[in-house]
Amino acid sequence: MSAPRIDLVSRIAKTLWGTRRDWRIERPAMPAMSPLGSHWVGPVMAILSMAIGWYAFKDARGDGAVGFALFIGSVSILLMAWSNMLATRIAPLEQLFGGLDRMYRWHRWFGALSVGAMWLHIQTADDVKGIRGASEDIADAAEDLAETGSNILYVLVAVSLLRWLPTRWWRVSHKFLVLPYAFSSWHFYTSTKPYANASVWGAWFTGFMILGLVAWVYRVVWRDAIRRGRHYRVSKIVDAGHTVEIELEPIGAPLRYNIGQFAFLKFGVRGMSEPHPFTIASSPDESDLRFFIKNLGDWTDALQHRIQVGSRVRVEGPYGALPLFPNHSESDIVWVAGGVGITPFLGAACSRMPDDGPVPHLFYCIRSTEDASGLEQLQQAAQEGRIVLHVHESAQGNRLRSQDLAKVMTQDGNRSAHVVMCGPDGLVKSMRAAMRTLGVRHVHVEGFDIRTGVGPDLSRTIHDVVTSKFGMRTPQRLRDSTHV
């Protein structure tokens, strides 16, 4: 075996082994929300839609715990239906679930729980006596399909949990989750149940099953293939090492958005058409869109080499409802940003007027000033009195501490202080704990992650192996010297 090949195998093995932290199974975090509010309307509706089904099966007759088996089977299907509906990203559901980042957390929760519910159904299902949903031959064929679907589901969920595939391949595999959903729905419809499909209960469950299928068609066919977003072109590229600043100019009507929202970008470059979410750093008063994109994976790594000035982009959005400003003008405002987490605050800092209520205190945590995104704009905004800027440079030993936050808030005003945070998980967790210690009640966090899992992230390694082996790596991006 040649030396380069040995090095490649060694690299893959080392990455596959990972670290203790990579394999740590953490308790799934519920969406960070206040105890009461409209953002709980959606989750409560979803849970009630499943719980109410118990009354359809509590009097079921048959062998074993037949009532529970039928009920937990219906729960599995409704969990998948809700997961499909949340993937549509439509505005009404975003409002009911409290923003797109929380929608996707519930999407993952419902998807994961549907696997457990399906497994319980298979383990407890037995002979059921009741009303047939279809002929025996059709019901048996549907049951065989459902068994095949359950195996497909286990494989696809394992692919999602183990972060080995590059995102573009994972997205393709994720779309095939419609197969176990469709097979399970058909089995549920044709199976023997305590009620007829033409009854009220039949309409209830069939309606949800159809909604789930329509949601998949809407997301995958209509939004991903036909109506893919507004047209833009790249007008400016600034490479800052691990972060690239991109400005987009509209081709036609520009996107209308609010401060702190984000959008999905789909570049018209080979291998870059898959949508990725990024917070909009520009002000709504500007016609162009500005983004700061950090190199965090195979797609963002390829982005820095493949796009150029003039590249076409599809922009889907806007999404998100990050409340950068409080409802009450007398509340103190504290913003905490880490790295590219500064993007939601850039547009707000540069567009607000000095006399627009309390001046926000922005704590910007960076490794060094050379790596800071938008620092010049923030310094200008601070000079104009739009914000009070606190820069914490970890390379100089100046890390953000709870004492720094306490200096800008009075003890009497802590309970009503309006705190917004966006950045790495470690920073957000430590500062959230500090806020609780200070007695702060209103903490809002922007935390959007479309893909999570356990184990080491092999996506970039596999991407590099494939591109180098098959000669797919593209040359360095052609840059317009006036835009670098």
Image: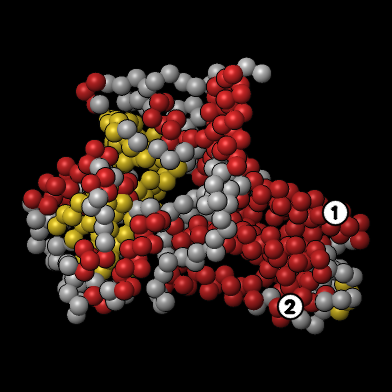
| 236 is higher (above) or lower (below) than 396 | above
Q: What mark, if any, has residue 152 been given in the picture?
A: none
Between 182 and 345, which is closer to the camera in this rendering?
A: 345
Name the one closer to the observer, 117 or 250.
117
Left or right of 423 on screen, residue 152: right
Q: Please name the residue shown 35% across and 66% down the image.
A: 432
Q: Residue at x 36, y 68 (%)?
A: 433
Asked if 364 appears above or below 53 in the picture, the reply is above
| Residue 348 showing in the rendered view | no
What mark, if any, has residue 144 been given in the picture? 1
131 or 349, nearer to the observer: 349
In this view, 260 is above or below 459: below
The image position of residue 442, as x and y in percent, is 31, 72
Q: CA distance from mark 1 to mark 2?
A: 24 Å
Residue nearest the observer in this picture, 352 or 257:
352
Name the element at disc 1. helix
**As drawn, is 68 to the left or to the right of 294?**
right
Which numbered circle lies on residue 56? 2
Q: Position of residue 381 (x, y in %)?
A: 13, 50
Give the mark, 1 or 2, whose residue is nearer the N terminus.
2
- Residue appearing at x 47%, y 73% in the figure: 41
- Identified by mark 2, the residue type is Ala
Residue, x 21% and y 23% (percent of image)? 482
Q: Pick out the residue farthest to the bottom.
A: 59
Q: Residues within 10 Å of mark 1 (few under 14, many from 20)?
A: some
Going by the numbered disc 1, the residue's amino acid type is: Asp
